Amino acid sequence: MQQLKQDHHKISSVEQEEKTQYKFGRGAQFNYKNKFIKNESTRENTEAVDDWEEPDVPTQFIEQQSRTIVNKVESKDVGMGYSMNPYAGCEHGCIYCYARNVHEYWGYSAGLDFEQKIIVKKNAAQLLRKFLLNPKWDATPIMLSGNTDCYQPAEKKFRLTRSLLEVCNEFNQPVGILTKNSGILRDKDLLQEMGKKNIVSAMVSITSFNEELRRMMEPRTTTAKQKLKVIEELSKSGVRMGIMMGPMIPGLNEHEMQRIMKAAADHGATFTAYTFIRLNGAIKFLFHDWLYKNFPNHADKVWHLIEQSHDGKVNDSRWGVRMRGEGSIAQMVAQQYKKYGKLYNMNAEEWSLDRTLFRVPGRQGKLF
């Protein structure tokens, strides 16, 4: 109980420092302190009152030459062995995004910096090609967007995701995709070709059909209606499509699970996944600020429901529990997921991407 009081006091102290107006079109409303940076500077006027306002900073793209692009996923709670992310940071601005904390390793804040300073890994395709040429590589499926969205707005300009898919198609390397942006349709021709070889599948993230909630919670993503069109169009093109319902947030969107699953199934989705909200690291403070500014009348209820689902905290880090939660609320969500998944024939088939077609271009024969 004492720890909970300390957390609430710390959160309130952070929020009281923020005097700026609400930044529409952004999820986070301020830059939370980077835990890796010891020294900070502040700007104050002569009366020592922080009443100045910084204008909305346009998105900055930071192009770089990276050393690696494929990462082995050590987490036991996610269904992927490897992932690759052509961008770090994400302009979608989803307030709950677990990837925000990773931005601190780059020297930025998990708050507004995460949405406004996007790292662009210009040599992503070359790095992937080099990785796949390793004679020990066994064609294990790789996930695009294991961290930030590979089809975020930056993709329209840089087309790095397209270049990665072209390499995968050339090698017949199986790949999975997770996105909440309709920009994936720009690559329908390539995805259709890969779908015929059964070396690609895609998931679209849908968290709510409440458009007002979506605009506040994930301000620069595609509408739920458009996401359903993406599922329908790609599934008709031969791409196996699914939905990610994450995160489910008690008091905000957990009651929409059945509607989301039914609509997705009606539009061609055949498999699903979900996560339960957890607020680790800086996300705890950013989400609290966002919640109380947007839903002042029932923010307390939502916050306490999250706490009840994580042993009195909001940032449970225990393996096997952190992504699903525990207690009556989390159990109810899990039961809904199981019930409606069966009702709408989701996850009914045993299915996997085809690894047997993998080959190194220019060499005779297949890997297996």
Image (tube, helix red, strand yellow):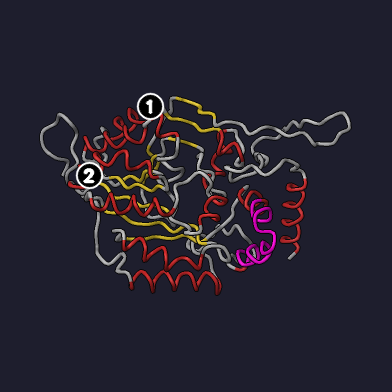
Number of on-image labels: 2
Q: Nearer the viewer, residue 110 or 290?
A: 290
Q: Quadrant of residue 338?
A: bottom left
Q: CA distance from mark 2 to mark 1?
A: 25 Å
Q: Secondary structure at mark 2?
A: helix
> Marks 2 and 1: CB-CB under 8 Å?
no
* Residue 336 as seen in the image, left or right of residue 194: right
Q: Is residue 306 magenta?
A: yes
Residue 65 belongs to the span the image colors magenta: no
Residue in the picture at 68% in, 53% down: 293
Mark sitting on residue 68: none
> Where the C terminus falls, by quadrant?
top left
- Is 222 drawn above or below residue 129 in the view shown? below
Amino acid of disc 1: Asn
Q: For mark 1, does the 10 Å Cα neighbourhood hold few (<14), some (14 to 19), or many (20 or more) residues? A: some
As displayed, is residue 66 above or below residue 114?
Answer: above
Left or right: 177 in relation to 357:
right
Label 2 sits on residue = 192
Range covered by the magenta-colored residues: 290-307
Residue 277's spot in the image, x, y percent?
Answer: 54, 59
Where residue 313 sits: x, y (%)? 64, 62
Q: Main secondary structure of the magenta part?
A: helix
Disc 1 target residue: 123
Residue type at mark 2? Gln
